[in-house]
Image (cartoon, rainbow, N blue to C red):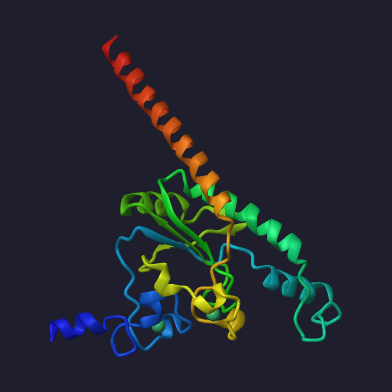
């Protein structure tokens, strides 16, 4: 029986635990879900909710304000027009900022920004650290702080294996569900950028470590005087 429960945990067969929350850390039913969203007390992964300003949502908001709900800057398909090049540039700046900010707390194993448009996933950023303590430090400092005019809402996420969470069709540019897919549409980032960010962060953490050792040493010296 116990074996059976372990096998079905977080799957469609599991009538108690929500498979979406378990795998993706987000479920469109939110608090109204009929199954349990078991939020972990600790995890190497944190979720910063709705922090990335999705260009499509931003364009929709602008269109609503400027056009009074009119449709003059929508194309024929009814979608708002987005300057793709600018959106890409903005995204990379956002990614760098996030990486540098989070990299202060420890080694980042994965930093994923969702391209999804559904209300329960839009703008989500997942950061997986090399251990739970680093994730906990990041959560304590970041939660409630402001970024780009938005208060950050940070929580531990049950997601530790992004292979289960990500939409493989999106990775191959063939997802027919588009922005409203319930699996993560992880925005691609050039590998060389991630590598150089990681190197910079490592160097910065090393320097900070030396600075803090210095402080401890000086305080001890002062104590002796
Ligand atoms: Zn659910
Ligand atoms: Zn998809």
Q: Nearer the viewer, residue 183 or 117?
A: 183
Tell me what residue is drawn at x 65 percent, y 59 percent: 91
Residue drawn at point x = 35 percent, y = 78 percent: 37
Residue 217 picture quarter:
top left
**Residue 182 % position (x, y):** 50, 81
- Quadrant of ligand 1: it is bottom left
Above or below for 96 versus 82: above
Count every numbered label the image shows and give the total. 0
Q: Whole-percent x and y of residue 107?
A: 41, 47
Q: Looking at the picture, how far across and down is residue 57, in whole percent?
A: 68, 73
User: Is 162 drawn above or below residue 167 in the view shown?
Assistant: above
- In this view, which residue lies farthest toward the top? 225
**Res 148 seen here:** no
Q: Which quadrant would the N terminus be assigned to in this image?
A: bottom left
Q: Looking at the image, can residue 37 be seen? A: yes
Rendered image quadrant of residue 208: top left
Q: Residue furthest right?
A: 72
Image position of 83 (left or right of 218): right
Q: Residue furthest left?
A: 1
Q: Compare residues 26 and 112 and report the one nearer the observer.
A: 112
In which quadrant of the rendered view does residue 210 lie?
A: top left
Q: Quadrant of the C terminus?
A: top left
Q: Is residue 55 left or right of residue 48?
A: right
Report the residue at 59% width, 50% height from top: 96
Q: Position of residue 21 (x, y in %)?
A: 39, 77
């Amino acid at each position: 029986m116990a074996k059976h429960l372990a096998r079905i945990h977080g799957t469609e067969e599991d009538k108690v635990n929500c498979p979406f929350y378990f795998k993706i850390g987000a479920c469109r039913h939110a608090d109204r879900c009929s199954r349990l969203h078991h939020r972990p007390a600790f995890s190497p992964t944190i979720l910063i909710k709705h922090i990335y300003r999705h260009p499509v949502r931003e364009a929709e908001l602008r269109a609503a304000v400027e056009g009074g709900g009119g449709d003059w800057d929508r194309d024929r398909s009814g979608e708002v027009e987005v300057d793709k090049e600018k959106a890409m540039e903005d995204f990379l700046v956002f990614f760098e900022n996030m990486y540098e900010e989070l990299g202060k707390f420890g080694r980042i194993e994965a930093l994923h920004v969702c391209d999804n448009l559904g209300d329960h996933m839009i703008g989500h950023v997942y950061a997986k650290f090399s251990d739970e303590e680093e994730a906990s430090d990041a959560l304590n400092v970041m939660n409630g702080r402001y970024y780009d005019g938005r208060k950050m809402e940070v929580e531990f996420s049950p997601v530790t294996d992004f292979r289960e969470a990500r939409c493989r069709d999106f990775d191959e540019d063939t997802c027919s569900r588009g922005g409203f897919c319930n699996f993560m549409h992880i925005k691609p980032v050039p590998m060389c950028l991630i590598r150089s960010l990681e190197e910079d962060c490592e160097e910065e953490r090393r320097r900070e470590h030396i600075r803090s050792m210095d402080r401890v040493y000086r305080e001890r010296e002062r104590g002796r005087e």
